[in-house]
Image (cartoon, coloured by chain):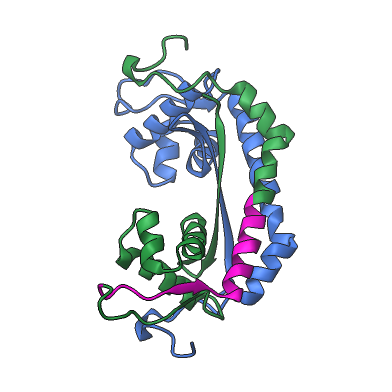
Chain colours: A blue, B green
Amino acid sequence: MQPRLKISIRVLCGEDIAMGPGKADLLEAIIREGSISGAGRAMGMSYRRAWLLVDMMNRCWASPLVSASPGHAGRGGSGGGARVTEAGLRVLAHYRALQSAAGALEQGADWQALTTMLRACPLDHQSGRAAAE
Amino acid sequence: MQPRLKISIRVLCGEDIAMGPGKADLLEAIIREGSISGAGRAMGMSYRRAWLLVDMMNRCWASPLVSASPGHAGRGGSGGGARVTEAGLRVLAHYRALQSAAGALEQGADWQALTTMLRACPLDHQSGRAAAE
């Protein structure tokens, strides 16, 4: 298994996370699924959690990122469609661009140097402290 | 309050975090304090937690990042000095360089565009959903 460089990018608005890895994935799921409930289901999260993430995004940004149409009776109360607005698409694109630029660090000399200094992984957690030290 | 871009960089070795923000800060605290217990104290963490972080680092990297001398009787059992090895200094420098390069994203067009799209923050959590939508 290769060592990995994990870079998490979050846009903070005070203490609130206006955009981050999970919210960006949720926006893309809403684009695919056409509803908050469908997107939540596809991501294995509750409707309530998906709705809260959307609500947070819509309150953090000057324009809502997701526009929801009201649910219909007979669709379980959590029905109704949702779409990612033009503002949402713009925010998503800029966020993905930041991630992509950060990912370029994996091509740089610092990461290359670090990979050569790591022990083969994963560690063997069964044997306790490695004997080779 | 200005919106902030928070970029977290972690070096993963399998599921283990070989280096991250907390471990880098701990290395610097060990350099300053000269011991694991002193570094933990300065960072407000228990000796046990500081020791576990050091142990994880020493097991993830091919050479130990921290070299500890045995404790002395009369210093409470958690005494004894510790120093960051040359390998530790190299890993720390490369990690800080990655952070610094990632931080340059704040000068880029994508982050600038995002800042103009954020609502003034922090949000007013008392008033519930913002009325302006």
Q: Residue at x 49, y 24 (%)?
A: A60
In the image, residue B123 lies at what x, y percent?
43, 21
Q: Is residue B10 left or right of residue B125?
A: right
Residue ranking furthest to the front: B74
Residue ranking furthest to the top: B132
Comparing B81 with B19, the one in front is B81
In the image, residue B95 lies at what x, y percent?
61, 60
Q: Residue at x 71, y 36 (%)?
A: B107
Comparing B83 with B88, the one in front is B83
Q: Is residue A100 magenta?
A: no
In the image, residue B67 lies at what x, y percent?
48, 78
Q: Residue at x 55, y 26 (%)?
A: B2
* Above or below for B119 versus A20: above
Give the number of callouts. 0
Image quadrant assignment for residue A129:
bottom left
Q: Residue at x 68, y 29 (%)?
A: B112
* Above or below for A60 versus B69: above
Q: Is residue B62 left or right of residue A98?
A: left
Comparing B42 with A94, the one in front is B42
In the image, residue B44 lies at what x, y percent?
34, 53
Residue A86 makes an appearance in the image = no
Per the rendered image, the range of residues in magenta is B76-99
Quarter of the N terminus of chain A within the rendering: bottom right
Residue A8 makes an appearance in the image = yes
